[in-house]
């Protein structure tokens, strides 16, 4: 069976058991502060388990790309070293939301593995939860009894809390689980060592393939467990491992999931996979990591220096360095593997193929930039090691290692490797300390501490948003929690229905108030967390169980939706003018402005900007009515040409916003004007690049656009008036600039002439004193610079010249003392000192060297006194 057939069989098996085939959730999670990436198939169903949302389908089956590189589930360090851990893997899952429980889950898993996939029964082992005293949980006898009905009891193993109690993270839904393991060893080995002893023991061929979780509890922030409102089933089968088992391989990398990538990499580097353990690890790391990086970018998350973006960057760099060090790949190569993935996943995850060119460019750029720092970092390491050798130490200090990591982007293991090649070791504790300091700092910056939810009423209705239609409604508070964010304490209130739009899809959250007979509480912001709409307040209502009226601040909302609709019109106009490669990469829509990031590889010209602006304004004037469809099946929306925004989470039905079916149609949860005419006016303000291949446009609409234009026009009017140019302003300005240039030139010539005219008169004023030819004069020049020029001309007039000049330049004093350097030495002249000691006479200051010093001052009446004081000093020099 090919991997696609294996996947298909799984989905079909459960579809035949009344499961709805669901889409995967995005890999990059946008609205859950506890999780950056989908790390289990159940993430997108968390709210269903908690009972905060009701299930449309009680049974679901799907395949979910998962990433396990951070937080509670992190496999990164194992990847490549073994043959069955991955950063990104597909998880096949079947789900019951308050529907079937242990019996069906266990018996169907058995049926699928043994009857459909035909895995020999004597190669299967199962584990059941053996109980845990600290959580006061007894062993899972129900699961054991069910398994006994199908499998030899000798093949059932008791498992600890670590292996058999599944938790998503520190808090959230959890429960006991039963795992299914397969023994893939050849019979000879199976006969000599009992497979049972190898289960959960890191044996590469006795591996867990399926985890069946019975979701019953919610782990609270204080560590306690409370029962969920209903019992659910969450199963996750490692797709790549299943393929290995069914394709008769002993490594995930030998399956058709990884083989095409390995073949491609072999031809890129000219080395063979399977010949040498060191290069094999590199091969595995690279073909694993490119999958993770590709999926992350395809989801709209670009490599960057923080959070999810940094995870993408770290994974990518790890792959680049394995290629560089072990496969001799000194030029970008990862980007060349993207096309393999795009073909491989065309059917299940078509968003890869759709964005192939974009992904390739981003990865190439990242590789280029790391390869640049990689060689600098290597040089830095070399020079550090040289210095250390001279100082007779062979330990690289922790701070240096940290700098290599922090500045040059070196992963720690690379630093360690290069160090050991050169007979060095790294002060790991010092490195960890430096890292910890940085981590603690960044954690403190972004720490958000959320307390547990406190229920106010028994009402557990899923949150309903009514703000598309009304801005005011009566509500009752369901629950609240206290949250500390950046040292400030705020409250999160949940009520339903709510007219408040929660920040998402780039549109900011609504502000407003909730009021009861006795109190008025300000809503500062509205956020989304999974499917909850959270109203942020800085005070908690005194009587929480009162009835409140929730009122959205209308003015901000109206201005925001003008900007949002204008964003859609602009998106369509961009695709019309620049091409259909333009895809949204981010947006920000607030009452005051709109910002839109999109894929495009060159600067947008002035002509294109004008055209885009014109198209949007024409569409505004056309007065196109909003066509809002709320429950469109996703397939239908796509068939109608709606632009799907990858990285946004969509259910099986979507909301479609159309302004003229031949112009703009997008999947969007935001709020919009009823008719484009409401937008009034649209103005582009700026255009620029924010990273490779991504441009950002900022624009205004409605009143803000009008105000912006008025202000600009007012400024222009003032300029016109000043220049007395009613028409052809730019011609007038150009003429002024030309005149100015010509006049400056003429003036400079006149000054030069003036200077030369001064020289003959001054020549005769040199006095010979003590082997020096001293000239002390007040002159009439236009700038301090001219004073210098004059002095250098005068020094040529005679041997051993000492020139002391002063001038009144537009009410300010400029003075200068200059002579030959040798003369200054011979006579002990110190011009700088002379200036300093006499500068009080001109009320100023300055300085320089022994042979040339200058000063400026404000007291023009002191010029004569200054000159005679200096001249007296020279007369005193022997
Ligand atoms: N949530 C479980 C896991 O991730 C089963 O899907 O292993």
Image: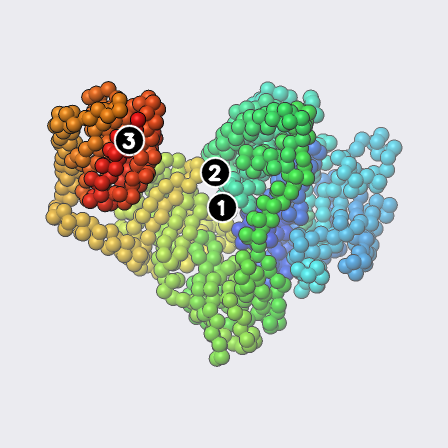
Is 567 placed left or right of 614 in the picture? right
- Label 3: few (<14), some or many (≥20) within 10 Å? few
Residue 854 appears at what percent x and percent y?
28, 35
Which of label 3 and label 1 is nearer to you?
A: 3
Residue to which mark 2 is pinned: 355
Q: Quadrant of residue 400?
A: top right
The answer to which of 1 and 857 lies nearer the viewer is: 857
Residue at the extreme bottom of the image, as rendered: 517
The answer to which of 551 and 461 lies nearer the viewer is: 551
Name the element at disc 2. loop
Name the element at disc 1. loop
> Could you tell me which quadrant the N terminus lies in?
top right
What separation in Å lies between label 2 and label 3 (alpha carbons)? 85 Å
In the rendered image of this protein, does residue 192 appear above or below residue 152?
Answer: above
Residue to which mark 3 is pinned: 876
What separation in Å lies between label 3 and label 1 (alpha carbons)? 87 Å
- Label 2: few (<14), some or many (≥20) within 10 Å? some
């Amino acid at each position: 069976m090919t991997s696609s057939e294996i996947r298909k069989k799984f989905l079909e098996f459960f579809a035949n058991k009344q499961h709805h085939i669901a889409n995967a959730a995005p890999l990059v999670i946008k609205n859950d502060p506890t999780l950056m990436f989908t790390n289990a198939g159940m993430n997108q169903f968390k709210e269903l388990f908690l009972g905060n949302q009701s299930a449309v389908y009680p049974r679901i089956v799907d395949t979910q790309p998962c990433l396990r590189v951070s937080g509670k589930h992190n496999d990164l360090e194992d990847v490549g070293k073994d043959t069955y851990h991955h950063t990104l893997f597909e998880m096949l899952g079947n789900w019951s939301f308050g529907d079937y429980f242990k019996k069906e889950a266990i018996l169907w898993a058995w049926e699928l593995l043994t009857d459909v996939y035909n895995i020999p029964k004597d190669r299967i082992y199962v584990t059941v939860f053996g109980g845990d005293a600290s959580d006061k949980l007894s062993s899972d006898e129900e699961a054991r009894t069910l398994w006994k009905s199908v499998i030899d009891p000798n093949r059932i193993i008791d498992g600890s809390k670590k292996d058999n109690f599944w938790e998503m993270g520190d808090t959230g839904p959890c429960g006991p689980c039963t795992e299914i393991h397969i023994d893939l060893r050849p019979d000879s080995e199976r006969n000599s060592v009992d497979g049972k002893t190898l289960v959960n023991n890191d044996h590469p061929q006795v591996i867990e393939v399926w985890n069946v979780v019975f979701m019953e509890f919610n782990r609270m922030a204080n560590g306690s467990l409370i029962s969920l409102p209903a019992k659910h089933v969450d199963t996750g089968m490692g797709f790549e491992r299943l393929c290995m088992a069914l394709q008769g391989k002993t490594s995930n990398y030998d399956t058709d999931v990884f083989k095409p990538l390995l073949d491609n990499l072999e031809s890129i580097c000219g080395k063979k996979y399977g010949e040498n353990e060191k290069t094999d690890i590199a091969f595995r790391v690279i073909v694993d990591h490119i999958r993770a990086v590709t999926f992350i970018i395809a989801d709209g998350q670009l490599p960057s220096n923080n959070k999810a973006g940094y995870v993408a960057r770290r994974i990518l760099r790890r792959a680049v360095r394995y290629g560089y060090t072990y496969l001799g790949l000194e030029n970008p190569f990862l980007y060349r593997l993207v096309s393999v993935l795009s073909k491989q996943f065309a059917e299940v995850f078509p968003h890869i193929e759709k964005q192939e060119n974009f992904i390739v460019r981003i990865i190439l750029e990242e590789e280029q930039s790391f390869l640049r720092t990689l060689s600098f970092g290597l040089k830095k390491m070399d020079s550090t090691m040289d210095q250390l050798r001279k100082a007779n130490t062979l330990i690289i200090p922790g701070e240096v290692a940290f700098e290599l990591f922090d500045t040059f982007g070196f992963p720690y293991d690379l630093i360690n490797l290069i160090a050991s090649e050169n007979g060095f070791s790294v002060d790991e504790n010092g490195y960890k300390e430096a890292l910890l300091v940085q981590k603690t700092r960044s954690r403190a910056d972004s720490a958000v501490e959320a307390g547990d939810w406190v229920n106010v009423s028994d009402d557990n209705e899923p949150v309903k948003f009514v703000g598309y239609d009304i801005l005011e409604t009566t509500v009752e508070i369901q629950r609240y929690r206290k949250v500390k964010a950046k040292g400030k304490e705020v409250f999160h209130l949940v009520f339903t229905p709510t007219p408040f739009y929660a920040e998402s899809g780039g549109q900011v959250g609504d502000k407003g108030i909730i009021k009861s007979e006795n109190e008025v509480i300000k809503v500062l912001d509205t956020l989304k967390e999974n499917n909850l709409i959270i109203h942020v307040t800085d005070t908690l209502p005194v009587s929480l169980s009162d009835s409140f009226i929730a009122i959205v601040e209308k003015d901000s909302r109206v201005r925001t939706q003008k900007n949002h609709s204008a964003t859609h019109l602009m998106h369509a106009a961009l695709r019309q003018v620049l091409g259909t490669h333009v895809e949204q990469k981010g947006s920000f829509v607030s009452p005051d402005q709109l910002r839109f990031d999109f894929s495009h590889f060159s600067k947008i010209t002035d002509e294109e900007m004008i055209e885009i602006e014109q198209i949007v304004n024409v569409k505004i004037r056309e007065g196109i009515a909003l066509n809002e469809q709320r429950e469109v099946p996703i397939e239908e929306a796509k068939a109608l040409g709606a632009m799907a925004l990858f990285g946004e989470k969509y259910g099986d039905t979507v909301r479609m916003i159309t302004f003229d079916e031949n112009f703009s149609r997008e999947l969007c949860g935001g709020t919009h004007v009823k008719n484009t005419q409401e937008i009034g006016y649209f103005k582009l303000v700026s255009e620029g690049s924010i990273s490779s291949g991504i441009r950002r446009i900022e624009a205004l609409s409605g009143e803000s656009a009008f105000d912006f234009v008025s202000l600009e026009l007012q400024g222009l009017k003032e300029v016109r008036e000043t220049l007395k140019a009613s028409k052809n302003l730019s011609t007038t300005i150009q003429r002024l600039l030309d005149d100015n240039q010509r006049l400056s030139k003429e003036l400079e010539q006149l000054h030069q002439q003036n200077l030369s005219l001064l020289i003959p008169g001054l020549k005769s004023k040199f006095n010979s004193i003590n082997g020096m030819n001293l000239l002390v004069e007040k002159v009439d020049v236009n700038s301090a610079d001219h004073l210098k020029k004059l002095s250098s001309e005068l020094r040529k007039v005679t041997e051993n010249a000492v020139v002391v000049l002063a001038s009144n330049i537009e009410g300010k004093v400029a003075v200068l003392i200059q002579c030959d350097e040798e003369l200054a030495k011979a006579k002990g002249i110190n011009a700088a000192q002379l200036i300093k000691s006499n500068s009080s006479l001109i009320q100023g200051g300055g300085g320089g060297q022994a042979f040339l010093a200058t000063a400026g001052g404000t007291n023009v009446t002191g010029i004569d006194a200054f000159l005679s004081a200096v001249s007296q000093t020279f007369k005193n020099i022997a």
